[in-house]
Image: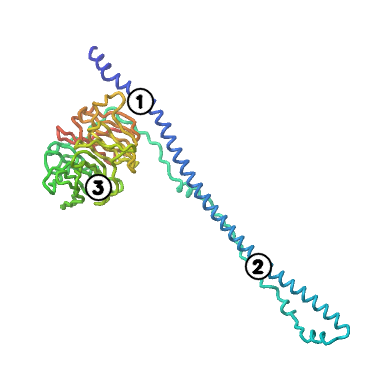
Amino acid sequence: MQEDLQDLEKSIYPRYQEAATNIPVQRADVNKRSQKLTTALDKQGEALHTEIDTIIQGMKSEIDAMDAQHRAAIDQQEDAINRTITEITQAILDLKRLLERLQDKLDTSDVCLVSAYTSRTEEFRNLPAQFQVTLPTFIPQEINREQIHKQIGSLSELAIRFLLDEPRILTDIQTECTDLRSVSCLSDSELWTCGYGDNILRLYNLQGELLRSVQTKSGNKPWDIAVTRSGGLVYTDWKDRSINLVNGTQIQTLIKLLGWIPQNLCSTSSGDLLVIMTSDDETQTKVVRYSGSTEKQSIQWDDQGKLLYSSGYGYKYLSENRNSDICGADNDNGAVVVVSSAGKLRFRYTGPPSTPRESFHPDCITTDSRGNILTSDFFNHRIHIIDQDGLFLRYIHNCGLQSPGGLCVDSRDNLFVAEWGTCKVKKLQYYK
């Protein structure tokens, strides 16, 4: 009974209390997410309305221009007709006067007038040049709702998956690595590993069989590894300041840095590389995006001009989320730092409210297909799961993890955890 009382008071009740505290936050998050979606839809609707209004106004302007051109042609014809009418009227008056004088006795001047007379009836017989007009028409297209829907965009379905209260270890792989730190999925059945204790990159299957081993190009110990979209393996060599690609039996140096030391890296959905690096004097840290060997983006400062990441050579792992956010685990700062793809700070996660901040030291980080962020809490032997907006969801902590470090997720949202001390990779199921 005393044991039950202690277990209820010290372990079970605090967990339920924390879960109950989190419910109002989750409810508020539902409204926040809904408002965010509604705002995005309104913005897209306004953009489409603006585009339609611009097109319609442009067509109206075309109609106005065609009307002006048509009226100018009518005015030109009217001027020609009125001018000819004036000439005809004058000719009629002249003829009448001449005929009246002819009825009287002719004098010398009249004879001259008769002799000088020239008929203009043939000239006046044809009306001024007439024009033909092909009037513009408007043929409305049938409104295609499906096409309009495509133009607006798509709204994904609500999918509710429950996190397991007790995640299950599906596979336990003993590696030959020393001080195992990093793991990266080549496929759902094969994974690359590396440790800080040697200079060998090792590929294992789920049965624990060593499929391949590769020594680093320089012979130095690698700092981190990542599998690219095309299935290649990249690793950072901090001693010679290089980022290298293992492709088949060849190792190619992609990037050689000057004044900066590459640490951790990840491959993005677009095929870019994100590399976190520290300056030689350990005063600055930044994340750099590379396309091949070309630098595309540098992320270092927040809107207040402060460094986003702690300086020094502490562990700082990276992962790209499904919404293109760049998620970093900053061990020295005790925070998960999440920025947008443009490099704008979105939030910092320093642990759930009930956890003292000084006890949280995130190590590695990864994301799953739901956009959830998973970060290993090395010294507390657990993994935090938070959503893409920084809301704490739960721990993975009751399945025998020991000093969890490197993390990666396969296509089925199974979690692979690299344990530093045991040098094992454990495959966990954490969704129902």
**Label 2 belongs to which residue?**
76
Q: Position of residue 94 (x, y in %)?
A: 79, 77
Label 1 vs label 2: CA separation?
80 Å
Q: Residues within 10 Å of mark 3 (few under 14, many from 20)?
A: many
Q: Hey, what amino acid is under mark 1?
A: Asn
Q: Position of residue 105 (x, y in %)?
A: 88, 85
Nearest the eye: 318 or 140: 318
The numbered mark, 3 or 1, whose residue comes first in the sequence reads 1
Q: Quadrant of residue 35?
A: top left
Q: Considering the numbered disc 1 on the image, is that residue within a helix, a strand or a loop?
A: helix
Q: Hey, what amino acid is under mark 3?
A: Thr
Contact check, label 3 and label 1, Cβ < 8 Å = no
| Circle on res. 22 | 1
Q: Residues within 10 Å of mark 2 (few under 14, many from 20)?
A: few
Label 3 vs label 2: CA separation?
72 Å
**Label 3 belongs to which residue?**
228
Contact check, label 3 and label 2, Cβ < 8 Å = no
Q: Is residue 347 above or below residue 341?
A: above
Q: Hey, what amino acid is under mark 2?
A: Gln
Q: Quadrant of residue 188?
A: top left
Q: Which mark is nearer the camera, 3 or 2?
A: 2
Figure quadrant of the C terminus? top left
Left or right: residue 73 compared with residue 386: right
State whether residue 322 appears in this view. no
